[in-house]
Amino acid sequence: MTNARLTGLDQLRGIAAICVVLTHFVHFQPGLVRFGNAYLAVDFFFVLSGYVMARAFEPALRDGMGPRRFLAMRYVRLWPPLAIGGVIALAAMLAKPTLPEFAGWLFVANLLLLPVVALSDKAYPLNPPAWSIFFELFANVLHAALLHRLSTRAVLVIALLAGLAFSAVQMEVGVNPGGGKPANFLAGFPRVIFAYCLGVVLYRAWRDRPPVKVPPLLAMLFMPISFALAMWLGHASILYNFLFVAVACPLIVVGGLRHEAGLIGIWLGRISFPLYATHFPVMRLVVWSGGGLVLAVVAALAVAFAVALAEPKIQKALRLTRRPAPEPVLPA
């Protein structure tokens, strides 16, 4: 496995996580406008996950690491922050005057990272952003069972076919294709296959040495600026979503590869997955307990930092330190 840190990609992961947090403000503050098409930050996570997983694990997969072992490593790596988010989500539910129906089953499913499309209007009602982790794990299984055996050209063909399916699905479910609700849950499959396979292709083609140059500053600013412009201009389209994944995401990755992050960027990377995994239930707990949006954001950042600091000890307790693994990308 390749374990040299790419700190520029870590920083991009942190920026994408913050964009996701911003787009969820509308759930906690009446009257706010959604942060443009920041749902596309999840697609960037999927691209980055494919890149990082190909970089870190394809040699081991070709040497005989089976899908079961690979999935177990990924599951346990992703599980602790999401489990913490699940416990906080249950506390938020208990803060409400009435406990939701099936709360116990929802909590168990949340801890197991399983969707509950038959019991709620959301696949992960306790922690809605967790839907993307389910699809990332699906992509990991696909990678271990099939993708690592295929040529780069074949993986590219799969990516393009999934991209066309991803665009077609949006004609039915909307420009924000989702994947986190029963009504659009199946849309998550072409969505993740498109972006994840593209990430695999990018690593195989570039090996950390892309043939083009993108200014790192432009890469770091592109997502927040483009999402903000979409919020102000009301721009969203199926074509834009496709081009964001197929063109913008690879160029953003190029800029990240050329960037050596400083302390702030490194910490953005460290808190990115804990923030993604816990921010929604933390903010929900604060708001449902009577706190405001500012306090909810401060609490979400504080919990993310605490989880990031605790992760090495958690991984040691789970005996993962003997086999180093890259930081979760989300979505990884």
Image: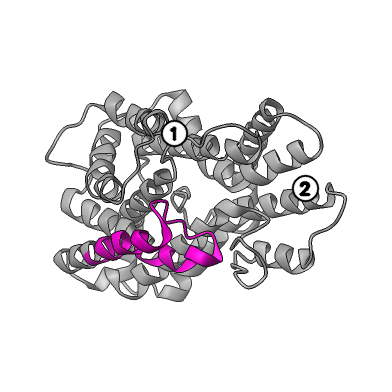
Q: Can you give x and y, in whole percent of width and height, for residue 83 in the image?
A: 67, 55
Which residue in the protein does label 1 denote?
Answer: 15
In which quadrant will I find the N terminus? bottom left
Residue 134 or residue 78, whichever sits in front: 134
Which residue in the protein does label 2 denote?
Answer: 92
What secondary structure is marked by label 1?
Answer: helix
What secondary structure is marked by label 2?
Answer: helix
Chief secondary structure of the magenta span? helix
Q: Image point 62% across, 41% down: which residue?
A: 27
User: What's the amino acid at mark 2?
Assistant: Ala
Q: Image point 18% across, 66% down: which residue?
A: 157
Decide whether residue 175 is among the magenta residues: yes
Q: Can you give x and y, in whole percent of width and height, for residue 131 in the image?
A: 53, 59
Q: Residues within 10 Å of mark 2 (few under 14, many from 20)?
A: many
User: What's the amino acid at mark 1?
Assistant: Ile
Q: Is residue 274 above or below residue 231?
A: below
Residue 261 or residue 23, whichever sits in front: 23
Residue 12 quadrant: top left
Which label lies toward us, 1 or 2? 2
Q: Are marks 1 and 2 in contact (CB under 8 Å)?
A: no
Q: How was the colour assigned to the protein in this rendering?
A: one colour
Q: Image point 78% across, 41% down: which residue?
A: 288
CA–CA distance between discs 1 and 2? 26 Å
Q: Is residue 47 above or below residue 122?
A: above
Q: Image point 25% across, 41% down: which residue?
A: 248
User: Which residues make up the magenta segment?
Assistant: 161-190
